[in-house]
Amino acid sequence: MIMDDKKVMRLPESKKGDVLKPGDEQPLEKPVIWAESRFPTKDLRARLETVWRENKLCYKFSVYPYKSLEKIFARKKQDYIYTIVKPGFDIVLLDKNGFMVKEIKVNLWNMTKVAGEGGKDKGLVLNSQTDCTKQSYRSIGGYSIKWQLDPDLIDDEKEEFIKSSSIKGEGI
C-alpha cells in the first residue's frame, strides 16, 4: 500500500485505481469462510473459517465426513506408536502472490467430534487461535493444506454413476 500526504491508501496491484480511505476497509471481525479443500482421490474434505481479533488469528478448521477417518482412529486404538506419530494437517496461509504468511499445524488427535443427525459423528473440528498481526491477516489471500495422513487409511472417493439402459441406434 502507498500512503500519500492526504492519508489515502492506494493498492498498487489495483487495476481500476481503487482508493481506500482509512476506515473503509472490510471489517476484520467479520468471519471469512474459505473455499472447501479436498484430499486428492479420497472422500475427505476440509473447510477453514478465519477472523481477526486482538492481534490473534482465530480459526475454525473442519474435516468431514468422519466415516472416512474411522480407520485412522481404529489404528490409534490398536497401535500405541501411531498415537505418537501425530497425523494431521498443515494449513498454509498465503498472500495474493502465493507467498506464505503463516503456517498452522493441526494435530488430528486434538480435534473434536461433531455430532450429526441420528447421533452419528459428522466430522471433526478445531476451534483455536494463534498470534497474528493486523497487516499479516489483511495480506492473506488464500490457503493450502498439507495432508499429513496415511492415504491408505482414508476411504476412497465414491463416484455415483448414472445407471442407463443400452443405447440403440436406428434400425437395430
Image (cartoon, rainbow, N blue to C red):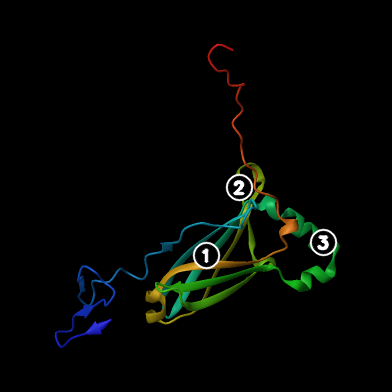
Residue under the point 37% across and 69% down? 29
Discs 1, 3 touching: Cβ within 8 Å = no
Q: Nearer the viewer, mark 2 or mark 3?
A: 3
51 is higher (above) or lower (below) than 124: below
- Label 1 vs label 3: CA separation? 26 Å
Residue type at the position of mark 3: Lys
58 is higher (above) or lower (below) than 78: below
Percent coordinates x, y for residue 107 in the rendering = 66, 70
Percent coordinates x, y for residue 93 in the rendering = 49, 72
Q: Residue 136 occupies which quadrant of the picture?
A: bottom left
From the image, which quarter does the C terminus lie in? top right
Residue corresponding to mark 3: 77
Secondary-structure class at tag 3: helix
> Is 4 on the left or on the right of 35, as rendered?
left
Res 87 label: none
Residue type at the position of mark 2: Gly
- Of 169 and 95, which appears nearest the observer? 169
Secondary-structure class at tag 2: loop
> Is 98 on the left or on the right of 146, as rendered?
left
Q: Residues within 10 Å of mark 2 (few under 14, many from 20)?
A: few
14 is higher (above) or lower (below) than 155: below
Residue corresponding to mark 1: 60
- Label 2 vs label 1: CA separation? 17 Å
- Of 82 and 52, which appears nearest the observer? 82
Secondary-structure class at tag 1: strand
Residue type at the position of mark 1: Lys
Residue corresponding to mark 2: 116
Percent coordinates x, y for residue 69 in the rendering = 70, 55
- Label 2 vs label 3: CA separation? 23 Å
